[in-house]
Amino acid sequence: MLHDCNIWASLPVPTLLIGADDTIAALNPAGEVFMNTTVKTLKGQPVWDRLMIDAPMEESFARVRANQSALFLNDVDVSPGQRAPVHCNVQIAPLTGIDAPEGMLMLMVSPREIAGRLGRSLQVESAAKSAIGMAEMLAHEIKNPLAGITGAAQLLSMGLTKDDLELTDLIVAESRRIVKLLEQVEQFGNLSPPQRRAVNIHDLLDRARRSARVGFAAHMEISDDYDPSLPATFADGDQLLQVFLNLLKNAAEASKGEPGKIRLRTYYEGSLRVRRRDGTHAPVPLQVEIIDDGPGLPPSIAAEVFEPFVSGRENGTGLGLALVSKIVLDHEGWVTVDSVPGRTAFRISLPVAPTETESDEEQD
């Protein structure tokens, strides 16, 4: 049978074998991840009790069995168990071969969000590089005259009345604010390449949580839902800690000073892969989610929130999330966000640290 061979286990998309009585006969590893359960639990279960698809599936199954030809359903919502619906493309095909039981079907579910998120990540990386290069040049050129303006205003203030001092103080304060903004811009260019090694994601999350609780997120309730079996990731610990701190700060500021909740969640999803700069694909199965219960992102900026200088907050610089995106992409991972009023989830997907044998081969 197909599901007994290596090809079945290697299929990158969730795939089910459906018997003639519409019960689940088999499920590949990607399908177990998608359904968030094991094949032992699902085997023999009616497929419609465990998988909800917004399409006339009984009719589709009947057509495939009658015509013995594949059927494609694009842009349908698929809900695996208790999880929220996922936008997918669905393929149904008759299982053929000498040993194939009569009426058995193969059901393949391709989540569209994966391709869409990858495309957005690559676009953000390109846009960030262009914007950062221009911003670095402008920052260098602007800081020098700003220093002269600040110095001149301070000299003028020595012989002015109280009313006039308010004007020079405003000049100095605004000049310093612009300098701080320019220094944030220069962070992008000054950020050294990550010094990557095996690090524990949960250790970094706990460090970020401790810092947040005594500072900017003191008014928030922070909980965790960790998968303790997660292996180490391959990352620069200091840079990844900066990512977690930036996202926690973003979540805390979304509450606008009101008490709120932040949840830190980690889990493993083996079906996700990211395209490297050399064109090859690499798995990014380690998932970190930072979820808040704030009002959500403004719809007008939700798709561009990781691009430089895009911000949903008054007086926001739009650089914090752009820096997050840059660091994650430098680690051959990706970052995405799903936001609705009452729930905003930033999701970071990271690679697993290589084994000692793999590290030695890379050095050779």
Image (spheres, rainbow, N blue to C red):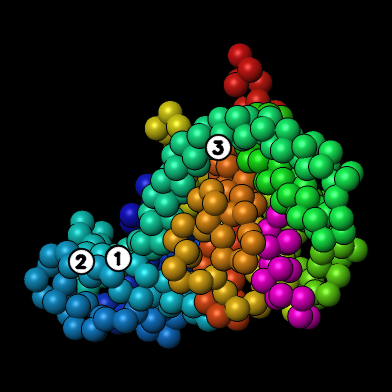
Q: Nearer the viewer, residue 244 or 75?
A: 244
Are dots 3 and 2 in contact, CB under 8 Å?
A: no
Q: Please state which of the two labelled residues, at mark 3 or mark 1, is closer to the viewer.
A: 3
In the rendered view, would you say 304 is above or below 360?
below
**Horizontally, is 198 left or right of 43 in the view?**
right
> Percent position (x, y) of residue 254?
67, 71
Q: Residue at x 18, y 67 (%)?
A: 71
- Indicate which disc, 3 or 1, sits on the residue closer to the N terminus: 1
**x, y percent for residue 88:** 34, 67
**Foreground: 71 or 181?**
181
Which amino acid lies under the numbered mark 1 shown in the image of this protein? Answer: Asn
Instruction: For marks 3 and 2, give the one nearer the viewer.
Output: 3
First to last magenta residue range = 244-259
Residue 166: percent from the left, percent from the top? Answer: 80, 58
Residue with the mark numbered 3: 135
Residue 59 seen from this side: yes
In terms of secondary structure, where does tag 2 sit? Answer: strand
In three-dimensional space, the C-alpha distance between marks 3 and 1, rounded to whole angstroms, equals: 40 Å
Mark 3 and mark 2: Cα distance apart in space: 47 Å
- Dots 2, 1 in contact, CB < 8 A: yes
The residue where tag 1 is placed is 89
Residue identifier under label 2: 72
